[in-house]
Amino acid sequence: MNETVTIPRGDYDRLRAASELLADLQTYDRAKGALAGREEDLIPTDCVNRLFGGENPLRV
């Protein structure tokens, strides 16, 4: 059975924005959890700056 619901456009837009915000927050929480659990490593700022400066990645 196909059920449909009709809501005002403003309500739809607010629900969609809230859904996107929730997805962003969940992604953030997963990333923070991975860092806290040492599942992800951070690259030192000095190394990142050297890479962005064009230095050979093998040398960095």
Image: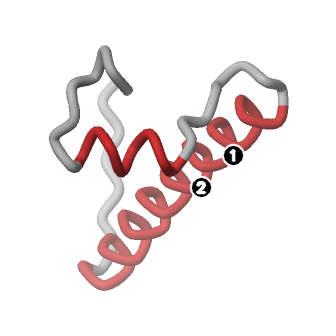
User: Is residue 26 shown above or below 9?
Assistant: above
Quadrant in which residue 36 is drawn:
top right
Q: Residue at x 31, y 47 (%)?
A: 4
Quarter of the image containing the N terminus?
A: top left
- The one nearer the camera, 31 or 52, is 52
Label 2: state its secondary structure: helix
At mark 1, the secondary structure is helix
Mark carried by residue 17: none
* Label 1, residues with CA under 10 Å away: few <14, some 14-19, many ≥20: few
| Residue designated by label 1 | 29
The quarter of the rendered structure image containing the C terminus is top left
Q: Position of residue 2 (x, y in %)?
A: 30, 30
User: Mark 2 touching mark 1, by CB under 8 A?
Assistant: yes
Quarter assignment of residue 39: top right
Residue 26, percent from left and from top? 61, 46
Write the residue at 35% across / 56% down: 5
Question: What is the count of numbered marks?
Answer: 2
Near mark 2 (Cα within 10 A), the count class, few <14, some 14-19 or many ≥20, is few
Please provide percent x and percent y for residue 18. Answer: 48, 67
Q: Which residue is more in the foreground, 60 or 43?
A: 60
State the residue position of label 2.
25
Q: How is the image coloured?
A: secondary structure
Q: Is residue 18 above or below residue 34?
A: below
**In the image, 36: left or right of 6?**
right
Residue sitting farthest toward the top: 58
Residue farthest toward the front in the current orientation of the protein:
59
Q: Using the numbered discs, state the Cα–Cα distance from disc 2 to disc 1 in whole angstroms.
A: 6 Å
Amino acid type for the residue under numbered disc 1: Asp
The answer to whether 26 is drawn above or below residue 21 in the figure is: above
Tag 2: residue type? Leu
Q: Is residue 33 left or right of residue 8?
A: right
